Amino acid sequence: MAKLVFGMNQSLDGYVDHLKISPPDAVLFRHFTEHVRGLTGMVYGRRIYEIMRYWDDDLPGWDAEERDFAAAWRSRPKWVVSRSLKSAGPNATVVENDLEAAIRGLKAQLTGEIDVAGPDLAGSLTNLGLIDEYRLYIHPIVLGRGTPFFAGPRPPLRLVASDQIGKDVIRLTYIPA
């Protein structure tokens, strides 16, 4: 059975905003590349998927590490939860009906780790009791407003790990209590 993991970069005050949180340093970027390589797949909300589609096309200014991440990202299957999208890019499937049945089916059919991206989607999956682990990548910045990591009431959680990645990021790993 696959494990569903919600993890995102966030500010000290709990907001996720890839444009306001500085780009990852080299160590954190390599961490995410290796993380993606090890995934069984990824489940995205529409907005996060549209941001991540940046990695679908090679850009001339990319360095070797960016090309490496893009190759890892492209190689993994993706499921995009959306009522408005009718199609998705390469190696991606749109999930438009019965979110719970679709995700329970993926968890039952697959093994390994499935990444969840998008606070609203993660909130829905949390309410359904489907998230197995939460990974908070805490950056030393205060945003003061924006989209919170937890889109709704925070479920009871138990800390199972903490580690530093790169020079400034702490990853906290929680499981439902």
Image (cartoon, rainbow, N blue to C red):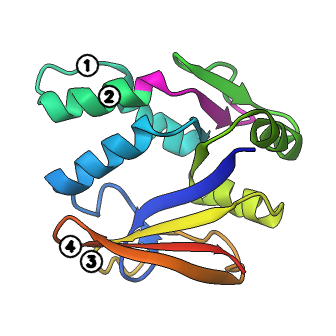
Within 10 Å of disc 2 (Cα), the crowding (few <14, some 14-19, many 20+) is many
In the visual, does 177 lie left or right of 142? right
Q: Mark on residue 43?
A: none
Q: Is residue 77 magenta?
A: yes
Of badges 3 and 2, the one in the foreground is 2
| Residue beneath the point at 51% across and 39% down | 39
Instruction: Please report whichever mark, 2 or 4, sits nearer to the chain's N-terminal start.
Output: 2
Instruction: Please report whichever mark, 3 or 2, sits nearer to the chain's N-terminal start.
Output: 2
Q: Secondary structure at mark 1?
A: loop
In the visual, does 16 lie left or right of 29? right
Q: Amino acid at mark 3?
A: Ile
Q: Amino acid at mark 1?
A: Asp
Quick check: can you spot residue 168? yes
CA–CA distance between discs 2 and 4?
Answer: 24 Å
Quick check: can you spot residue 24? no
Does 95 appear above or below 133? above
Of badges 1 and 4, the one in the foreground is 4
| Residue beneath the point at 52% across and 37% down | 49
Residue at mark 3 = 141
Instruction: Please report whichever mark, 1 or 4, sits nearer to the chain's N-terminal start.
Output: 1
CA–CA distance between discs 4 and 3?
Answer: 10 Å
Which residue is nearer to you in this view: 61 or 170?
170
The region drawn magenta spans 74-84
Residue at mark 4 = 168
Does 22 appear above or below 4? below
Give residue 122's position: percent from left, percent from top.
Answer: 65, 58
Q: Mark on residue 58?
A: 1
Instruction: Please report whichever mark, 1 or 3, sits nearer to the chain's N-terminal start.
Output: 1
Give residue 144's position: percent from left, percent from top.
Answer: 38, 81
Instruction: Please report whichever mark, 4 or 3, sits nearer to the chain's N-terminal start.
Output: 3
Q: Mark on residue 70?
A: 2
CA–CA distance between discs 3 and 2?
Answer: 27 Å
